[in-house]
Amino acid sequence: MASPNTAPSPGEVSGAALPAKLKASCHCGRVSIELPSPPDKLNECRCTVCYKYGALWAYFPRDTLAVATAEGGTVEAYVRADSDGYLSFNRCGHCGGMTHWLGLGEYAGPKRKAGVNCRLLPEKDIEGIPREVNYC
Ligand SMILES: [Zn+2]
């Protein structure tokens, strides 16, 4: 938080009420993800793994997501055996909440698509956002 005597950093608009960034957080709060903007749509992916996780995905370029772990927090990964190792499903090591997926190998670049489980956002933050049933 900037103090009133601190000059705004480049790109910061002084005095303007900037919209708060959305922050997704697992149940125990040890893993959180800051989204660059509100999702414009949400996907209830029905692939074999997402269906079982009950995830509700929004997709962003990987380098626009800020994944943070609180003290004692860890992120654990599941790489599905039938994916040729290109996709990592990530969860909180404490509460087990599915948090996000990332591409691996040639799909790991900073501009590559990544998925955030928007079930980790407060309900009010996802109300009214169109939903689709597709594959991630
Ligand atoms: Zn957790």
Image (cartoon, rainbow, N blue to C red):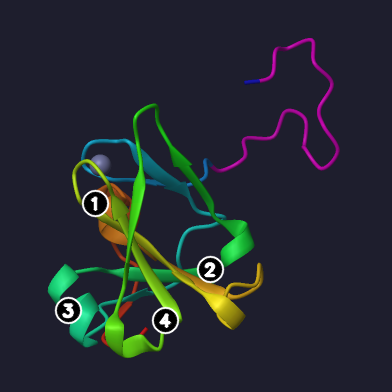
In the rendering, at what x and y percent does residue 15 appear? 72, 28
Which mark lies nearer to you, 4 or 2? 4
Quadrant (top left/top right/bottom left/bottom right) for the C terminus = bottom left
Secondary structure under the numbered disc 4 in the rendered image: loop
Residue in the image at 32% along x and 36% along y: 30
Judge whether residue 13 is colored magenta. yes
Classed neighbour count for the residue bearing mark 3: other residues with Cα under 10 Å, few (<14), some (14–19), many (≥20): few
Element at label 3: helix
Q: Are marks 3 and 4 in contact (CB under 8 Å)?
A: no
Q: Nearer the viewer, residue 118 or 18?
A: 118
Residue 123 - label: 1
How far from the left and from the top, in percent, is residue 1? Answer: 62, 21
Residue at mark 4: 85
Q: Could you tell me the amino acid type at mark 1? A: Glu
Query: Residue 60 got which mark?
Result: 2
43 w.r.t. 75: above or below: below
